[in-house]
Image (spheres, rainbow, N blue to C red):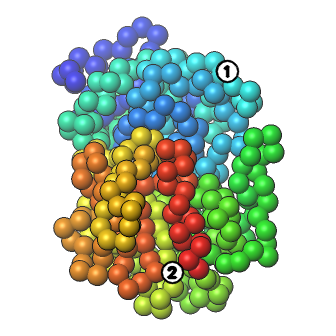
Amino acid sequence: MADPASFRAQPSGATGCLVLADGTVIWGRGFGAVGSAVGEVCFNTAMTGYQEVMTDPSYAAQIVTFTFPHIGNVGANPEDFESRVEGAVGCVVREDVTEPSNFRSTERFVEWMAKAGKIGLSGVDTRALTRRIRQSGAPNAVIAHAPDGKFDIPALIARAQGWAGLEGMDLAIRVTRDSQESWEGGYWRLGHGYGRAARDATPHVVAVDYGAKDNIFRNLVKAGARVTVVPVKTSFDEIMALAPDGVFLSNGPGDPAATGEYAVPVIAALLEADVPLFGICLGHQLLALAAGAKTIKMHQGHRGANHPVQRVGEGWGETSGLVEITSMNHGFAVDVDTLPENVEQTHVSLFDGTNCGIAIKGKRAFAVQYHPEASPGPQDSFYLFSKFVGGL
């Protein structure tokens, strides 16, 4: 990345900018919502699924740089939301947003971004920005869009510098649902849309919503469960009053150690009571914390739909060593060197060797760092839902 001063001069026609905390100003063409938003800049390597990425609560307080140059190809539609709560605050793309060419599209991505209150920036050298993140880590920044091209750059720099960042930040409390809910959505089928969950199905899974993606609940239903979703601060006694056969710990944003201040005691009590547990992403990290491990902030994080993960450790039989192609979105990781003796590592990233799965010995409790519900592989990881629900 060039010297920050070289990015200060605003080129003709620039209606958007990304202002980093170190003073770097990256100009482009704004789209979507008008205004500004602060967050951590990350990058995602997936070639599709941009609407799902932008509505994933795990991206709360983040600005997503898409490395795939053509964003907008499939438009947007009301079926591909991962959640109706806060997701990514904005995105950065290489080319101008393309016109949709997909039979499921109901509107252009530009229009959808504007209605969703999310800010976009096009015309950016996303390769250079991605390289900067890989070399220097994910920076804090402000993304801004002004159709008249007028920006108060010093104020935007000050805002980026004044933002505390994700480390130490509990964001799950911002994206969880307000009240208990009986999940009703089933799995999606072409030409049919989403099905309906059978309310008399067994077993009964209570899912703790730390910022969950809806498709996780649909996959639990597909595996045969009846699902009740509860907010993050639901107590152990309140969960047990629902008579769960198992408890699911969802994905979510922010620092797991911060969320763990109130979540870990509940999970530890569930472990003590021998309640079967399954966690994904943040839920994986929280289960590890409850078992006595620690989490760390990653240099650049893992975000994409083609991350290779290998099954390791005991218990996999003939499938030991098998590699799954997975979908990931996380900026924190479980520190494998802090795993207690009673916690087995079950999956490992083949990109950097970081922990991607654990199982608690002597308990029916396991978790993975990646997202099996996101159809990576495309079905490499669906077995996890069957493993959890089938064992209840």
- The picture places residue 327, in percent across and down from the top left corner, at 45, 47
Q: CA distance from mark 2 to mark 1?
A: 44 Å
- The picture places residue 135, in percent across and down from the top left corner, at 20, 36
What is the crowding at mark 2: few (fewer than 14 residues within 10 Å), some, or many (at least 20)? many
Q: Residue at x 47, y 68 (%)?
A: 279
Q: Secondary structure at mark 2?
A: loop
Residue 101's tag is 1
What is the crowding at mark 1: few (fewer than 14 residues within 10 Å), some, or many (at least 20)? few
Seen from the viewer's position, the closer of residues 315 and 357 is 315
Residue 12 placement, left or right of 292? right
Q: Residue furthest front?
A: 318
Q: Residue at x 44, y 77 (%)?
A: 365
Q: Amino acid at mark 2?
A: Pro
Residue 298 placement, left or right of 92? left
Seen from the viewer's position, the closer of residues 140 and 130 is 130
Where 379 sits versus 15, above or below?
Answer: below
Residue 276's tag is 2
For the residues labelled 2 and 1, say whether their Cβ atoms are less than 8 Å apart: no
Q: Residue at x 65, y 28 (%)?
A: 75
Task: Tell me if I can see residue 145 in this picture.
Answer: no
Task: Tell me if I can see residue 252 in this picture.
Answer: yes
Q: Secondary structure at mark 1?
A: loop
Location of the N terminus by quadrant is top left
Seen from the viewer's position, the closer of residues 228 and 223 is 223
Sequence-first disc among 2 and 1: 1
